[in-house]
Image (spheres, rainbow, N blue to C red):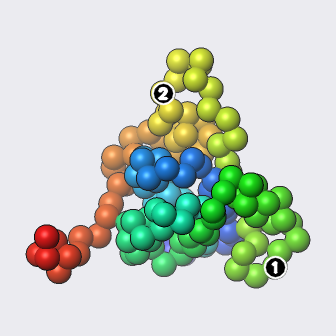
Amino acid sequence: MNQLEKVKSRILLDFHHGMGDELICNGLVREYCKKYETVGIFCIKRNYPSVSFMYRDLENLRIHVVSSHTERLRFRFLNPLRFGQNHYDEIRAIDAYDEESGIRFERQVYTTTFGVPLEKKWDSFFVKRDPEREAAL
């Protein structure tokens, strides 16, 4: 899908916020960034350096740093009252994970909640390399 085919709207994706979850959702976030004009995600403060580095190549991604579950829910609740960059036309969220369904977490996230084929977890995963940082190691 090229830039001209993007949906002219803004979507907020709300998934679990541990660093492992951020890595699992890399392909999912990138798929949404291909389709939407602006995509927003939440990130807990301690993970921001890693998450912002991982997505630094995505110009249409906004990362909202939150310090608690309550702050994230408040942001979502107040969305209809916002204008400008912090307003989203649509919110897609994982509000519950069904451990008893027999469906793996990744499949529930990708296919059931966000409608993205699970294969995109690997096919769309990308982190832009930084040769200078790698050489410093």
Q: In the visual, does 56 lie left or right of 113? A: left
Mark 2 or mark 1: whose residue is earlier in sequence:
1
Q: In the visual, does 89 lie left or right of 53? A: right
Label 1 secondary element: loop
- State the mark number for residue 70: none
Residue at (61, 69) in percent of width and height: 64
Residue at (53, 18) in percent of width and height: 102
Residue at (47, 41) in percent of width and height: 117
- Residue 113's spot in the image, x, y percent? 62, 40
Question: Disc 2 vs disc 1: Cβ atoms closer than 8 Å?
Answer: no
Observer-nearest residue: 20 or 1? 20
Q: What residue would you read off at disc 1? A: 83
Relative to 69, say whether 82 is above or below. below
Label 2 secondary element: loop
Q: In the visual, does 9 lie left or right of 54? A: right
Observer-nearest residue: 19 or 89? 19
Mark 1 is surrounded, within 10 Å at the Cα level, by few (under 14), some (14 to 19) or many (20 or more) other residues, namely few
- Residue 66's spot in the image, x, y percent? 63, 64
Q: Which quadrant would the C terminus be assigned to in this image?
A: bottom left
Q: Quadrant of residue 99?
A: top right
Q: What residue would you read off at disc 2? A: 104
Q: Amino acid at mark 2?
A: Arg
- Residue 136's spot in the image, x, y percent? 14, 76
Q: Quadrant of residue 60?
A: bottom right
